[in-house]
Amino acid sequence: MKEVDIVIVGGGPAGLAAALTAASCSASVLLVDDGLQLGGQLIKQTHKFFGSSQQFAGIRGIEIARNFIHEIKKSSNIEVLTQATVTGYYEDGVLTILEGFNGNKLIKVKPKRMIVATGASENMLPFINNDLPGVYGAGAVQTLMNVYGVVPGKEVLMVGAGNIGLIVAYQLMQANIQVKAIVEAMPCIGGYWVHASKIRRLGVPIYTSCTLKEVKGDEKVEGVTISNIDKGFNFIPQTEKEFNVDTVCLAVGLSPLAELLWQADCQMAYIPELCGYVPQRDENMKTSNDMIYIAGDVAGIEEASSAMVEGQVAGLNAAASLNLYHKEYSQIKQKFKRQLAQLRNNSMCEAITKGVQKATIKKGGDYVYSR
Amino acid sequence: MSIPGSGIPTKDDLKKVIPPSKVLGQGPVVIVECFQNIPCDPCAASCPSGAIQPFEDINDLPAVDYAKCTGCGLCIASCPGLAIFVVDVNYSNTEALIKLPYELLPIPQKGQVVSGLDRAGQKVADVKVMKVLKNKNKTNVVSILVPKDLAMVIRNIRVEEIVNG
């Protein structure tokens, strides 16, 4: 049985930040990711990030991942397992991990603490022919294009004008793929306005209060019908438009990927502002199980910039709970708290702030003083 | 709050960010088409002359002290939202110079004539590329010469592949 101070499940922005912070407190860390390489969604993000210029703003996600991975390789406290899926958490605190391309190697680990940073999964949308080849999630389109250099098609309808829909539409245009239109069921654009303006300047229309009604085609996507919808999300007759496209890209939201936390019997709550069932936590990102911490989208759907700070909070406090203190524990903890508050201090994040308040059940003591 | 419907800033939105005509007449100046409070501040950090004021809160909208702006355009490539432009309305008697961010291929060449697009991506004029600044962060800054009356209209370009011949 392998023993380690902290296992971190998920090597995206939250997990990477958690690993580096925990390692900086001298904790031994095992970072487990199911991907071929670390980085999670960061390795697909070719756009420059928002946030504070003191943190990662202005840097492309792909570069942020590169910097993180470089630091992690340098750290002697961090062991990395890629192509490895954490499949179970048992009552005696043992984790099972399936490693390898076929998942045919079983590893058992007993960590003192676990940080779950598993991220989110993409939502699906019901419409006629939604199972035809050519219907993709936005994450899949990004993986194909930005990781493997494969274009998904020639002409695309984007469904969803949140940040992901707007950003992926822009990335498709950069890859010289025509985006015929973006449809958004809500009456207004959900993503950052600058992203929307950027895509409009490329001549891509955005139709709000409008959604995908039907995909046409026998064996693959050959066209789409879109329709305006009323406030009750019912199709409005005679408002249909048709486009010839070979690809439909769905960017209709994310749901926290919390199976491991359900299995570990953490207290969960349905919080719409955080996009689904999320674990209740204290301000240190500790769940109802003293062994288990969380960070990133699994704790509630948000931006990568706040996921990274949450990862730092979880890494810092999971280590501190093992008597492994960062030399500036109290100051750095306050700094992270301040950064999170700043990132959420805008009207776009009103719902998130409310959701985080609902999900935070305890203040979360300071480990230094609670000893 | 007009952008959410269309993604295109309205005249009222633009009024808030287009400098007074006196300032515009004095040479190249920055126009920050950023209308939403989001956590983002690289523009202020990039400004070498302190014209884009330091942010008190990271969610502030950029505020420009036009007296300090030299029109250098360093902020253009720093903006994650590609929302910053520099405009010199008095470049010549008939033409204005616009510096804009560009992240598509092919990268235009100096002297090339490309399509000048408005904020909806519609072509409104042929424009001439005066300079292409290739940046390390891969947001290139392209300077274009446009008819003076389109100085506040053109905000993008479309570059056709140059066919050998």
Image (tube, coloured by chain):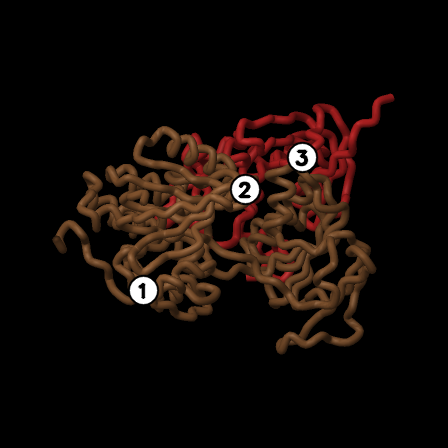
Quadrant assignment, res B138? top right
Confirm whether circles 2 and 3 share one chain.
Answer: no
Residue A126 higher or lower than A8, as above or below:
below
Instruction: Indicate the amino acid at tag 3.
Output: Ala
Pick the residue in front: A346 or B111.
A346
Confirm whether circles 2 and 1 share one chain.
Answer: yes
Pick the residue in front: A33 or A339.
A33
Q: CA distance from mark 2 to mark 3?
A: 58 Å
Apparent side of residue A355 relative to residue A223 in the rendered image (left or right): left
Which residue is pictured at 38% across the width and 68% down the height? A268
Instruction: Indicate the amino acid at tag 2.
Output: Phe
Which residue is pictured at 74% across the width and 30% down the height? B128
On residue A360, which mark appears?
1
Number of other residues with Cα within 10 Å of mark 1, as a class: few under 14, some 14 to 19, many 20 or more: some
Evaluate whether residue B10 shows in this view: no
Quadrant assignment, res A225? bottom right
Place of residue A100 in the rendered image (x, y in percent of width and height, measured from the top left):
50, 41
- Ranked by sequence position, the earlier of labels 2 and 1 is 2
Instruction: Indicate the amino acid at tag 1.
Output: Thr
Residue placed under numbered mark 2 in the picture: A101
Pick the residue in front: B64 or A51.
A51
Mark 1 chain: A
Secondary structure type for disc 3: strand
Residue placed under numbered mark 3 in the picture: B96
Place of residue B142 in the rendered image (x, y in percent of width and height, measured from the top left):
64, 31
Mark 3 chain: B
Display colour for chain A: brown
Q: Kindly indicate which chain is depicted in red in the rendered structure.
A: B
Q: CA distance from mark 2 to mark 1?
A: 38 Å
Residue closest to the far right: B165
Apparent side of residue B37 relative to residue B13 in the rendered image (left or right): left
